[in-house]
Image (cartoon, helix red, strand yellow):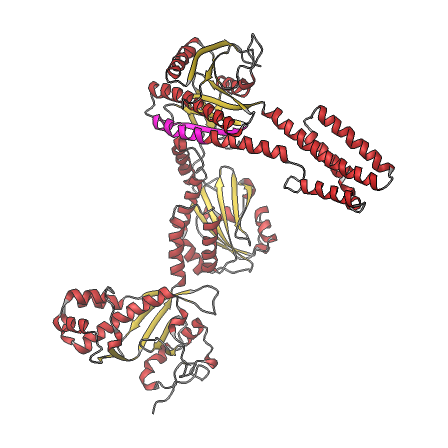
């Protein structure tokens, strides 16, 4: 007659899953019953139903001792595991069954050489994620399986004859395939009885640190929302924290990033000087993980006051970098990661130990993020930015990024008269909207005798007349404001003044039913046309850029406005293999690319029957310039020095320049204009023009002249030649 183990509610606090187990068989479990760390459970073979579990396991699994599952419906261990982890547990179980088959059916094979491999495999623990109602996140458990009380016997005809034969013959190939999981055992061919003992330890901290390390060292920037949220979740789970803060030291500033409730990043900036005496810089100077127990009693700087105001009370600070300067709190600080809690004295010495294990991975992640802030930089010059990012990641002082003695190549394909075309579109839309408004007022006046309505009618007529005569710069804003203030405020009333007025109001509202909340038909058509021109020009230029980069890697910045303009810098400081041949090849290829852009524009004109005309200009200069990256501006590069500034002035004004003789624009539709300063420059580009004429890019007639003096720039000349359409 079998007797049951006492329930967890009894004096020995055992958690019984099956009252049929005799306590005499499991006296050895008593010593582990009250363990807080060692997890022990006895399970049935095949279905892994729990027969017994100690208090630690019951707590982890969220099993209430007083509501323990009785013998008729014992809790299966597999219900706490994912599908993947169930498979891992079953594979280990099959190896144990295999081992017991040998021990009990063919014990002489225990001396075989391959048995050592099997013994190692069954002694290895597995790590599974156990889902528990006690915890918000799965707990990682390292389990060992003990099968000493497992009994295996063949059922006869249904047994796995292949395995039995292999065991009997000592067929190592088949046996090794079985023990490595390459051949599954047909366990239905055996009668398996007894019980299995699971011994486990909660290794959630260790496993979370492993996962964090793998996540942190991959190449995605930690400051991207997706990766930050994953890191944030794991760090909060590991340290039982509420949020994560990342501080990056950049020159004299500290860039601070905080997670938000919306899975986004919130950024703010503090000067390093304002952090003097802060807990952040104290941890950096000590170069060790530190705990701030309660900010409400020790809040030395505005930054920490901001955190306290947001509800954070305790901090776990992980400095990344080495503070070597005695006179500086920050020293060579790369950055710092802080765990935040809304409870005081949340963090423990064990948290400090776990945080220390993450320093290398966090440092790697922050260095990666520092380098990737230059990810948008043009590939030809990215190597220099990455060099500087690496220097700064080690805490070294910033150095300017300069490319000296580079040749500038500037060109532009500009929509001629785009401002006038857009003004005409604005004029058409405003007149249409005012006429719709006038129709409303006229309908109202027809339905009732209203003196104010007649005056409003006269105002609208006068406004329409002024719009038809000319359009001013501010008309797009002031005209709409006028309608809103003097007409639209009456719409609810006007809609009640007869069916004609109601219909007119509805027509006005429908015409303005768009994101601009005004009539935007002509402007929309203009915008679509300009966008189409820009898109096709960009695609054309990009195709040629791929060819040009193969000649010699160079920096190229391309901007879209009403047309497209490009700025190229090339030279030995960018490409060490650079030679005069590469320079001349790039200049010639630039001209061919601009001609192709012109042909693209001609195709657009024919396809869309548009009146938009494009002009094309290339600025020649044989004098090198120095370019420097200024982090305080949005531009990637600025020219350096007074001699370089002249080139920038010419760039900004040359497309509006006039012929000093005719006072016409030097740029003309469907023509390529080259602007130069010296006879040497002209001789070089004259040769290129002859090549382009020979290749049927250009017509043979070349016009020339002098450029009217620009402010601060004199002596420029130009040559102009018609671009031929593509020969069908």
Place of residue 260 in the rendered image (x, y in percent of width and height, measured from the top left): 55, 52
Report the number of discs: 0
Residue 586, by quadrant, is top left
Place of residue 512 in the rendered image (x, y in percent of width and height, measured from the top left): 67, 40
* Residue depicted at 15% across the width and 66% down the height: 172
Residue 10, by quadrant, is bottom left
Instruction: From this view, report whether residue 357 is shown above or below residue 252.
Output: below
Instruction: From this view, report whether residue 683 is shown above or below residue 446.
Output: above
Quarter placement of the N terminus: bottom left
450 relative position to 191: left or right: right
| Residue 322 visible, this orientation | no
Quarter placement of the C terminus: top left
52 relative position to 243: left or right: left
In the foreground, 508 or 344: 508
* Residue depicted at 76% across the width and 29% down the height: 463
| Residue 496 visible, this orientation | yes
In the foreground, 6 or 397: 6
Place of residue 515 in the rendered image (x, y in percent of width and height, measured from the top left): 63, 41
Instruction: From this view, report whether residue 158 is shown above or below residue 536.
Output: below
Q: Is residue 238 magenta?
A: no
- Residue at the extreme top: 661
* Magenta region: 539-561
Q: Is residue 555 magenta?
A: yes
């Amino acid at each position: 007659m079998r007797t049951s183990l006492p329930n967890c509610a009894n004096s020995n606090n055992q958690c019984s899953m099956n009252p049929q187990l005799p306590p005499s068989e499991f006296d050895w479990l008593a010593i582990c019953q009250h363990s807080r760390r060692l997890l022990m459970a006895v399970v049935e073979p095949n279905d892994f139903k729990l027969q017994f579990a100690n208090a630690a396991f019951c707590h982890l699994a969220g099993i209430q001792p007083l509501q323990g599952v009785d013998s008729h419906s014992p809790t299966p261990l597999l219900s706490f595991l994912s599908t993947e982890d169930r498979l891992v547990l079953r594979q280990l179980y099959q190896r144990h069954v295999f081992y017991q088959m040998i021990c009990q059916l063919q014990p002489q094979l225990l001396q075989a050489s391959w048995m050592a491999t099997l013994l190692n495999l069954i002694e290895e623990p597995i790590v599974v994620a156990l889902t528990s109602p006690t915890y918000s996140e799965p707990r990682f458990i390292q389990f060992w399986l003990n099968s000493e009380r497992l009994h295996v016997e063949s059922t006869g005809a249904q047994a796995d004859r292949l395995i039995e034969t292999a065991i009997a013959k000592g067929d190592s190939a088949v046996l090794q395939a079985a023990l490595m999981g390459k051949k599954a055992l047909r366990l239905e061919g055996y009668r398996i009885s007894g019980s299995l003992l699971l011994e486990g330890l909660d290794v959630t901290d260790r496993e979370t640190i492993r996962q964090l390390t793998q996540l942190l060292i991959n190449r995605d920037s930690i400051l991207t929302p997706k990766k930050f949220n994953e890191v944030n979740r794991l760090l909060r789970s590991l340290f039982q924290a509420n949020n994560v803060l990342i501080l990056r030291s950049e020159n004299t500033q500290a860039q601070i990033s905080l997670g938000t409730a919306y899975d986004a990043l919130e950024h703010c900036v503090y000067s390093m000087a304002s952090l003097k005496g802060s807990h952040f810089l104290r941890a950096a100077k000590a170069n060790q993980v530190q705990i701030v127990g309660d900010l409400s009693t020790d809040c030395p700087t505005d930054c920490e006051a901001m955190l306290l105001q947001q509800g954070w009370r305790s901090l776990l600070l992980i400095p990344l970098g080495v503070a070597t300067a005695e006179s500086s709190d920050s020293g060579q600080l790369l950055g710092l990661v802080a765990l935040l809690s809304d409870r005081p004295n949340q963090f423990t010495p064990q948290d400090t130990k776990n945080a220390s294990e993450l320093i290398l991975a966090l440092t790697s992640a922050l260095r990666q993020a520092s380098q990737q802030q230059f990810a948008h930089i043009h590939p030809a010059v990215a190597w220099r930015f990455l060099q500087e990012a690496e220097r700064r990641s080690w805490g070294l002082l910033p150095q300017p990024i300069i490319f000296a003695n580079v040749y500038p190549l500037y060109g532009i394909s500009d929509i001629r008269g785009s401002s006038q075309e857009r003004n005409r579109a604005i004029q058409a839309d405003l007149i249409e909207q005012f006429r719709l408004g006038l129709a409303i007022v006229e309908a109202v006046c027809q339905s009732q005798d209203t003196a104010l309505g007649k005056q409003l009618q006269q105002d609208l007529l006068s406004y329409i007349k002024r719009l038809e005569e000319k359009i001013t710069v501010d008309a797009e804003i002031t005209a709409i404001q006028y309608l809103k203030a003097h007409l639209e405020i009456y719409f609810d009333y006007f809609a009640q003044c007869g069916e004609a007025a109601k219909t007119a109001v509805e027509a006005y509202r429908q015409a303005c039913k768009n994101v601009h909340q005004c009539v935007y038909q002509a402007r929309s058509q203009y915008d679509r046309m300009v966008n189409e021109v820009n898109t096709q020009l960009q695609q054309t230029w990009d195709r040629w850029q791929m060819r040009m980069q193969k000649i010699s890697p160079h920096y190229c910045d391309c901007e879209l406005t009403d047309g497209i303009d490009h700025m190229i810098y090339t030279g030995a400081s960018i490409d060490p293999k650079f030679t005069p041949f590469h320079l001349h090849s790039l200049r010639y290829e630039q001209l061919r690319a601009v001609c192709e852009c012109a042909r693209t524009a001609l195709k657009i004109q024919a396809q869309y029957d548009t009146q938009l005309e494009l002009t094309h200009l290339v600025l020649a200069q044989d004098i090198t310039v120095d370019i420097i990256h200024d982090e305080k501006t949005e531009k990637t590069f600025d020219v350096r020095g007074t001699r370089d500034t002249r080139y920038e002035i010419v760039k900004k004004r040359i497309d509006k320049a006039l012929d000093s003789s005719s006072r016409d624009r030097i740029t003309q539709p469907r023509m390529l204009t080259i602007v130069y300063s010296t006879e040497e420059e002209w001789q070089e580009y004259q040769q290129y023009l002859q090549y382009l004429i020979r290749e049927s890019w250009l017509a043979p007639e070349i016009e020339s002249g002098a450029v009217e003096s620009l402010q601060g720039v004199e002596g420029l000349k130009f040559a102009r030649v018609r671009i031929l359409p593509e020969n069908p």
